[in-house]
Image (tube, rainbow, N blue to C red):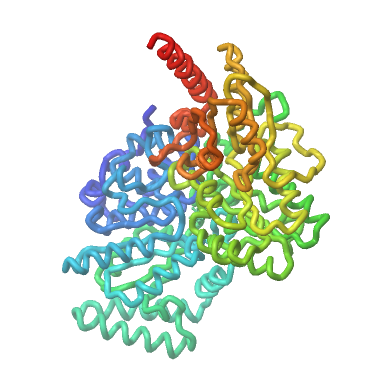
Amino acid sequence: MEFKAGKLLSQIDIPEDLRAKMQISDLPELTQELRDFIIDVVSAKGGHFAASLGVAELTVALHYVFNTPHDQLVWDVGHQAYGHKILTGRRKKFHTNRVFEGLSGFPKRSESHYDTFGVGHSSTSISAALGMAVGARLQNDRERQHIAIIGDGAMTAGMAFEGLNHGGVEDSNLLVVLNDNCMSIDPNVGALKEYLTDITTSQTYNKVKDEVWTLLGKISKFGPNAQAIAQKVENAIKTAVLKQSNFFESLNFRYFGPIDGHNVTHLVEVLKDLKDIPGPKILHILTTKGKGYSLAEKEQTKWHAPGLFNKETGEIIKITPKDPQPPRYQDVFGHTIVELAEKNDKIVGVTPAMPSGSSLNIMMKAMPKKAFDVGIAEQHAVTFSAGMATAGLIPFCNIYSSFMQRAYDQVVHDVALQNLHVIFCLDRAGLAGADGPTHHGAYDLAFMRCIPNMIVAAPMNEEELRNMMYTAQAENYGPFSIRYPRGQGVMPQWKTPFKKLKIGKGQKVRSGEDIAILSIGHIGNYALKATQALEEDNISAALYDLRFVKPIDELLLHEVFGKFDKVITVEDGCIQGGMGSAVLEFMADHGYHAQLVRLGIPDRIIEHGSQDELYADCNYDTASIRKAAKKLLNEGRESKAEKAFA
Ligand SMILES: Cc1ncc(C[n+]2csc(CCOP(=O)(O)OP(=O)(O)O)c2C)c(N)n1
């Protein structure tokens, strides 16, 4: 199904059309059409919403002023780049956004040469654009422009500061556009946010800026030397009047703004001016997340990625099944941490900018002093938790599995080396679905299990998650990692009484005679269904839920290898180095000989799609587990038959 574009937008297939066919006076209408198109498609197909609406003017202005793709735009995170995709040759395919085998929800180099850098994780844009700018400089290209577009949320991450710190001393064509909407997914937090508000609202500052701009406008008519003079004049005025220098200026970035990011013609004028100013510079624009769709402007967190909705009424479309539904794992985490913290006053919660995504917002509401949103700062979140652990607190540090990749050194160096009692709750572990490869939590089982002192656990259902959280805080076990997937569990009645689990003990879920299936985590429910389906094939399959990958349940494994010579391992994680590898290591270490098939995420990049589509694509959905068991048993039968005839 193709969506209809407005009369201006439909004339634009690539940005060259925009530059050739549109007058500056057409741009407001074009921007409106771009917004309408985003609203049409996202309401019907889902995806990120409010962020792209907020940068509609900026997107049009950037492609109008700069010679893209030669001039390079680097979108930070990339969830706001829908307008960019639509203007850069992908309008007709945009309805396939985030769908299996369709367009990616984020900029991606292999998808388009307008996507200069693959993104999904935040705060990489300044470093990447700086690298491109230095690359151009070293090839003696002084004309090419490099523009990082970064939100105030993404600006809170250490990496953004690392990029600024370096960018300020490289003589390169780098423009950072700071899209300040006061929002991350949830309201933005921290001192930088307050600083940005201060410079936005300070009347003295803005008056000076206006004067400097006027002056610049006049002086620039007098040729290149005048720019240097203008800079001196601007600095002199600033230093004199503002007394304290601007934060970005102090890092050698020329700072411009704040300006209204919803005035497209003014944006065009400003960007044209900035194009002629060499060196590192920052343009601070003010926008409203969700601009142009009033409900989204009012409830920006809800409309960050609302799912399908009726665009006329704003009603979010939810299919409500008749039967009670199991909760999402994240909500089990959110409610359980509050329950535990009510009984144990040492417990604190930490999230790097994902209060709603992790459901730590439940604790932030119930006990605001005990729950911390630290900004998009995974590394800090881990070391901050480590620090609190040294003070006798018990931090539950909740980080999406894929974002935890950023904080690996902190996990090793600050937590594990000192054997500190920090409990990591890794949400979105396993294949995360439509967000795709940047967001899949593929590696945590492998990267956590090789760290000394670390306990590595994964619940098969809600009750196990509660009991793992309960167990992890009940005693000081040192670092403890619990991973669970995106989405719902399996137990509508999930609020069961807490039970302390034995560390490193798995459980037999189902007995069987022909083959053993070993699983870890929620994917065990798929394995359970496979064992039931295998009955129809006259195959009796046992199922073991390992619960812990480290320490691994050796008694259980002795039982398995003592009884079965055909074993399948199933995990929603990378095959290399994960649970299956741990089982193989055990088998080799103890001299067992069995045919063992490992199912999990293969050694390739897994694209986006629904979780079930991806499980099938990676051969560990229910049907694939069943098939693998049949194949393994048949191979055994065939080889016995071959031997008999030999
Ligand atoms: C490393 C990392 N941590 C967390 C996220 C999740 N995340 C996606 S968008 C976003 C908020 C970004 O805020 P901002 O940069 O201000 O952009 P806005 O959505 O406000 O336009 C967050 C926290 C991420 N993508 N990457």
Q: Residue at x 33, y 53 (%)?
A: 117
Q: Residue furthest left?
A: 140
Residue 500 rendering spot, x and y as whole percentages: 78, 45
Residue 356 visible to an observer of this rendering: no
**561 w.r.t. 474: above or below:** above
**352 w.r.t. 2: above or below:** below
Residue 166 rendering spot, x and y as whole percentages: 37, 73
**548 w.r.t. 540: above or below:** below
For this rendering, which residue is in front, 309 or 323?
Answer: 323
Q: Residue at x 36, y 53 (%)?
A: 59
The quadrant of the rendering that contains the N terminus is top left
**242 w.r.t. 495: above or below:** below
Is residue 630 rendered to the left or right of residue 423?
left
* Residue 5 falls in image quadrant: top left
Residue 39 rendering spot, x and y as whole percentages: 46, 40
For this rendering, which residue is in front, 61 or 78?
Answer: 78
Q: Residue at x 65, y 41 (%)?
A: 553
For this rendering, which residue is in front, 304 or 567?
Answer: 567
Residue 34 rendering spot, x and y as whole percentages: 38, 45
Is residue 615 rendered to the left or right of residue 89?
right
Q: Residue furthest bottom?
A: 240
Residue 577 visible to an observer of this rendering: yes
For this rendering, which residue is in front, 61 or 615?
Answer: 615
Q: How many marks?
A: 0
The quadrant of the rendering that contains the C terminus is top left
